[in-house]
Image (cartoon, rainbow, N blue to C red):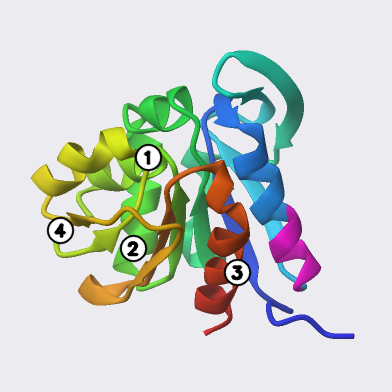
Amino acid sequence: MTGRLDGKKIAFLMANSGVEEVELTHPWKALQDEGATTVLIAPERGTVQAFESDVEKAGTYEAELAVADADAGDYDALVLPGGTTNPDQLRLDDDAVAFVKAVAASGKPIAAICHGPWTLIEAGVVDGKRLSSWPSLRTDITNAGGTWFDQEATTCGHGGYTLVSSRNPDDLDAFSAAAIDAFAG
């Protein structure tokens, strides 16, 4: 049986601590189930500490590559999981911001959930986009030139790359399905 994402290589970018575990594992599994090769990238190669509800330590995962060593040209798409502290750290990491900017500039699709759009905002790639996120990002998105929607999954092709976005872990089924559609496209 072949999957819709056979032959696709998808980057998952997160900080070494703070990612919301289910926002990593749910789309990770969904994309792999469709045949994608998934690569975990973080500021530093090695352990990524995930959390549940931003406060309780959850599982650990291995970042295969430091973002400074990652080349956007090696990937077909990018996923930005949330968690409050995860994207807050990424938006302060010059290499992470440059990687996100390079993926968007190359026209490759990006999927971001919950607080994940903070990194997109820092990269300057939200202007003209329609997107969903955790409600507290509404003002940040609007100030960055985006239009915020309160819906479980939003897909926007404006501005040279496709962006899939969702509000929170309750939206993961819709988020993963929309990401698969965008990444298969």
Residue at 65% x, 55% y: name it: 27
Q: Amino acid at mark 2?
A: Ala
Residue of label 1: 134
Q: Amino acid at mark 4?
A: Asp
2 vs 1, front mark: 1
Give me the C-alpha separation between circle 4 and circle 3: 24 Å
Disc 2 secondary structure class: helix
Residue of label 4: 127
**Can you say whether 135 is above or below 164 in the image?**
above
Is label 3 in contact with label 2 (beta carbons under 8 Å)?
Answer: no
- Residue extent of the magenta highlight: 29-34
Residue of label 3: 177
Residue 103 visible, this orientation: yes
**Can you say whether 49 is above or below 65 in the image?**
above
Does the magenta segment cover residue 33? yes
Q: Name the side, left or right, on which 101 lies relative to 81.
A: left
Residue at 37% x, 51% y: name it: 100
Where is residue 94 shown, x and y percent of the image? 32, 34
Residue 30: which quarter of the image?
A: bottom right
Residue 76 visible, this orientation: no
Where is residue 86 shown, x and y percent of the image? 48, 28
Residue at 69% x, 28% y: name it: 46
